[in-house]
Amino acid sequence: MSKHIPPRYNFLEVEEKFQKIWEEQKVFKTKEDTDAPKYYVLEMFPYPSGKIHMGHVRNYTIGDVVARYKMMKGFCVLHPMGWDAFGLPAENAAIKHKTQPAKWTYSNIEYMKRQLKRMGFSYDWERELATCDPSYYRWEQLFFLEMYEKGLVYRQKTKVNWCEKCQTVLANEQVIEGCCWRCDSPVVEKELYGWFFKITAYAEELLKGLDSLKGWPERVVTMQRNWIGKSEGALIDFPLEGDKGTLRVFTTRPDTLFGVTFMSIAPEHPLVKRLCEGTEQQKLVEEFVENWSKIPKREIKMGLKEKEGVFTGSYAIHPITGEKIPIYVANFVLMEYGTGAVMAVPAHDQRDFEFAKKFSLPMKLVIKPKDKDISVETMQEAWEGPGVLVDSGEFSGLDNEEAKRAIISYLEEKGIGKKEINYRLRDWGISRQRYWGAPIPIVYCENCGVVPVNKEDLPVELPQDAVPDEKGRSPLPRLESFVNTSCPKCGAPAKRETDTMDTFVESSWYFARFTCPDENNAPFDKSRVDKWLPVDQYIGGIEHAILHLLYSRFFTRVLRDLGYLSIDEPFENLLTQGMVLKNGEKMSKSKGNVVDPNEMINTYGADTVRLFMLFAAPPSQDIDWSAEGVEGAYRFLNRLWRLVFENLDILKNASRQQEILKKALNKKELKKLRRKTHQTIAKAEKDINDRFHFNTAIAAVMELVNEILAFVRTKEDSSYNEIEASVLREAIEAALLLLHPMVPHITSELWEQIGNDEPIWNIKWPKADEDIAKEDTVTIAIQVNGKLRGKIEIPAGATKEQVQEAALKENNVERYVSGRELKKVIYVPNRLINLVVKG
């Protein structure tokens, strides 16, 4: 048979062909009426900004490989996509382009959807949802009302993080190094009424639940654990001098109680005014408090500001010793943690140590380490480690852990303190003073006060024809058709709440709605949501490790307790993919290093882009965009294309009967190719199934392709007998099946070209034959006293004694061991033998 001259690899034609087939035949529509095991794979859905970027491409390609692989493994796969469609970017873009946010958002959705389809992702588009659709957020409003009934929603006036540019409140998590996470403008404090979700009611459960997340990166679990921040300690009451009441502190170190030399309180502590009033310090304290209010709390938490403070002019009294202790207002004490007041023990707390050094305050050593001598005169830093109590009254001599329990018991007995558990986590402020968000279903009535909207009147629809003003201020307070309503209780004229919900609320439950987006009479179809949840594999960026993931875990528990869900945790496994960099920096318009996915698809095809993204690094690592890497991926696909087409007649006519393939085991070259084929299947299975290392799986297939090419080159006359043709077809089919989840278009075309009637996406993942994959011989390294002295080729599975006997016969080895006593033999099966000799 003569070789074919291969047609040009027209990737655009091939990709359009199969994307059309997949859509027309609804190949990726979720098949719910099946007994196959379920698998729910989900990538964090995008904000419809108008263009997908390379970060999206990487994230969604990883998810698509997982989905396609699981389909081939026989799972019933749910792989949906939707749009996190509310939020500030749409408003800002609409203001810039003098249009409506709704119009801007929906046009972007259509454009981005076309882009995603061009990448060949296996989404069930019939489940598509957009969070700005009233059919979606009506259920969110229902959850709000039911949470309100359960006491999990409340309204209060509080100091909030305010972004002047965005004209909205930000949660603490949304303030990054003192600036807005969206626009990078400085954040200030402002006092406003706002609505809060009581996430703290679930603090302990959220913390304990982390222990069950075995499929999450340890880094993310640690970040969540630290954010929740459980602290066990004591509340202690310090009387104020002059019968001014008491100052209550929370401490995790009651064992250091006798080492207190000053008190630190937060600038917004309610006692500040009383403590400084009428003292010489009053003006200094007022100036300090005024200045501090301009410093964002997030910046304080991260320790970016120098520790500063001022004496209030007042003293506390030590509840046991009766000593006078000066009280300072300090910028590192936060009102939202503990009680907003701290007993300062500079000898045993580094923060207090630095403050004491700066203001020349005294220090007392009350914990002495067991293994060394220290003194306050020579200390260069606080001793925060364990030890034995000294100068601590009746508690001296106790181990510090034992002393914690003893001192708490004493405080409780005397009525001056008690054991306490504190959390760093604070309730979630969800009010946003912007237009493009889900309306909060509350009205205000002069007669009835705060009144929830009746459930049967949901959704409270956001008027989509409204437009924010040039400064970004919401039009809702001035839109009479929206704000003016009647009281659900008494029917009197009332005003609607004009704040909208934080967009993180929408993304905290979307994964559950994806299981039944066509359910119109309730948020969820219970049987379907119970079938699909939890999500088996969730994929997204590490930047969402706290905000989105913590809120989703909270919301899942709330919906469970409201009777909607039956699970505790939303995501069984989590993969946080690395970033796509260029020249070592994250791609961004400001740096001018953005690579346009559309341009890459037009130049090389979607399969090439997918292959590069998967081959460049394991999913969890960053990858640096490389034009050479993209070219390399393109060359490989062209090589695969030519390999198939040049041997098309041979492949089409080759038998697939096992009886014929078995005959190949009698011929060395054929046995070698079959062994490589089955070794590659085994490796790809392990790399993908065990750890999602697509890069090494692809590398293994590339090695197989090279082996096939070497085999083909030995057949220059193109004359193949029945056995040779069958072995060649087996190898090429295996390569196509293993690559199909990564590069679905080209593999679909080549699979069809070699004469397969059943499309490749309906074919099961190949199974390796362990007997065929076994090596006949293995190479064993021989060491003498740990130094390499030779190598031997022996039958695979040889015993230790057989290997030892062969090793001792090697000429170079023999001269190192001859005449010397053999003390020990260390054998690593199929890899290494180390002969330990005396002398």
Image: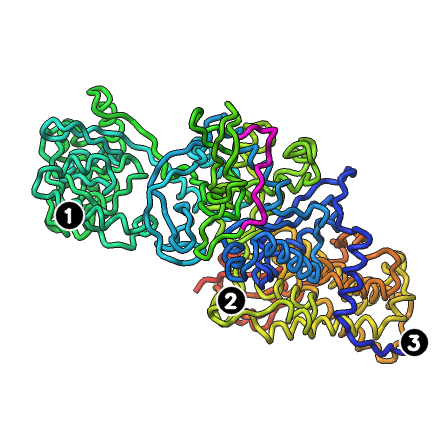
When the figure is inspected, residue 197 is found, relative to residue 649, above or below; the finding is above
Camera-side residue of 469 and 602: 469
Q: Which residue corresponds to mark 2? A: 587
Image quarter where the C terminus lies is: bottom left
- Separation (CA) of disc 2 from disc 3: 51 Å
Position of 121 compared to 97: left or right? Answer: right
Q: Which residue corresponds to mark 1? A: 356
Neighbor class of circle 2 (other Cα within 10 Å; few <14, some 14-19, many 20+) is many
Q: What amino acid does circle 1 point to? A: Ala
**Label 2 vs 1, first from the N-terminus:** 1
**Label 3 vs 1, first from the N-terminus:** 3
Q: Which residues are magenta?
A: 453-466
Camera-side residue of 397 and 324: 324
- Residue 759 in the image, given as x and y percentages of width and height: 83, 57
SS at mark 1 in the image? helix
Q: Which-is-in-front pick, marks 3 and 1?
A: 1
- Separation (CA) of disc 3 from disc 1: 90 Å
Which residue appears at 38% of the width and 34% of the height? 156
Position of 67 compared to 85: left or right? Answer: right
Neighbor class of circle 1 (other Cα within 10 Å; few <14, some 14-19, many 20+) is some
**Label 2 vs 3, first from the N-terminus:** 3
Q: Which residue corresponds to mark 3? A: 1
When the figure is inspected, residue 638 is found, relative to residue 168, above or below; the finding is below
SS at mark 2 in the image? loop
Q: Which mark is residue 398?
A: none
- Residue 680 in the image, given as x and y percentages of width and height: 71, 61
Q: Which-is-in-front pick, marks 2 and 1?
A: 2
- Magenta span contains residue 457: yes
- Residue 196 in the image, given as x and y percentages of width and height: 43, 36
